[in-house]
Amino acid sequence: MASSMLSLGSTYLLPREISKDKLKLGTSGSNPFLKAKSISRVTMTVAVKPSRFEGITMAPPDPILGVSEAFKADTNEMKLNLGVGAYRTEELQPYVLNVVKKAENLMLERGDNKEYLPIEGLAAFNKATAELLFGAGHPVIKEQRVATIQGLSGTGSLRLAAALIERYFPGAKVVISSPTWGNHKNIFNDAKVPWSEYRYYDPKTIGLDFEGMIADIKEAPEGSFILLHGCAHNPTGIDPTPEQWVKIADVIQEKNHIPFFDVAYQGFASGSLDEDAASVRLFAERGMEFFVAQSYSKNLGLYAERIGAINVVCSSADAATRVKSQLKRIARPMYSNPPVHGARIVANVVGDATMFGEWKAEMEMMAGRIKTVRQELYDSLVSKDKSGKDWSFILKQIGMFSFTGLNKAQSDNMTNKWHVYMTKDGRISLAGLSLAKCEYLADAIIDSYHNVS
Ligand code: PLA
């Protein structure tokens, strides 16, 4: 009984971890129950021993995912979670796409097995994902110039690319937009890839600082990696125009830089998969070599399935084969091979004309709902705020976020006074907003903007 393993709550100690002296404490006679009691006291003595992890300090909560934790702990009934970019229905419930349920039912009926995938992932997924990005029949695909491997969603795919950069481009810098998605910096820091920033957001115009962006990309050391958001820039919701994209491609080419696209919202920004891939395709048409990380978290609502890919467009099929072999070599010791479920969903949906059509319709519906609440929020702000402030920037932004321009103190007020949970950079996820809550949110924004500095 108690002699093989001692338990105190969820703490288990093996007998050899308890010293003989301590075992003697309080032991009386041979009554096994008394022994057990004293042993549990011994366990407590052992539990207060200084930890080997004393030097590990408490990590701060994640600036985005930590917001959801704080939201859960709030008991106020008006609370609103506009932190993480996750799509909600008008009833503010999570949404599983009907086409995903359909694909899952098919997979269950077919009795697909759970064997390991190859290191590079599911072949049908890798084919489908590259075709969605570049368009089926694109020369980069026909000429087998893309090295595609399945990754652990957008984040894991970015991390694989970062590891490849660290290994094969030592000292090269990744230049990222200011601001950017918070996790980009963590990814490159952890991969030991140096990074710097290019200007992107102009707080005066609440728009793109295009001149600054071009100047900083020009300034970056030749051969830098330029991280670009393919569509629906996070957190600003401000994208370059098609004409500006051409100029960005020009300067990147001039400086021999390597573009690195993060495409986390294909189809989710405009409602069209092709339109949202226009920036990436522009670079592909120019015959450039570049990286593209993809995610199916938002456009197929597969957040927890961790499904995405890293694509490296190369100038020859031979280079692509070698790059792919090295991406596999990086993946193998990290996580061996990727999970199959999400990959099968994507491959089934894209591979079946009916389901593909259904997906596009649901994607349009989701993108449409976000556009509707964006308009409603703007209308509420304009009708309630008598100060004459121009709120039209909200309508100019695209994608699931609005960058409100609220500073940290104002964002804190949104949360502390109004129970509106958002990131401290002033970003709100419109995908977590309902029409019914727009007026309340407008009141919160107006109060925070005018009464907190
Ligand atoms: N790239 C960008 C630009 C993103 O916004 C996100 C997700 C990702 C990559 C990675 O997503 P994935 O790993 O799930 O594919 N950004 C979210 C969630 C939606 C997050 O922070 O993890 C956000 O709220 O910003």
Image (cartoon, helix red, strand yellow):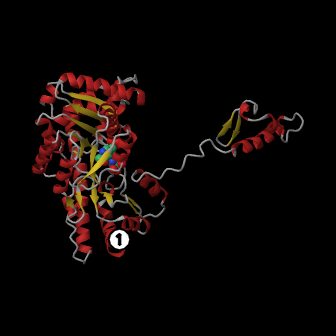
Q: Nearer the viewer, residue 62 or 435?
A: 62
| Residue in view at x 77 percent, y 35 percent | 19
Residue 20 position (above or below residue 250): above
Instruction: Name the kind of residue labelled 1 in the image.
Output: Ser
Q: Is residue 36 above or below residue 316?
A: below
Mark 1 beta carbon near ligand 1 (under 8 Å): no
Q: Secondary structure at mark 1?
A: helix
Quarter of the image with the N terminus in it:
top right
Extreme residue toward the bottom, this view: 386
Nearest to the observer: residue 12 or residue 193: 193
Q: Quadrant of residue 17?
A: top right
For the point 20% across and 49% down, the residue is 219
* Left or right of 13 on screen, residue 369: left
Instruction: Report x, y in % for residue 221.
Output: 23, 43
Does residue 151 appear anywhere in the picture? yes
Q: Which residue is at the front of the view, 74 or 102?
A: 74
Identify residue for label 1.
Answer: 448
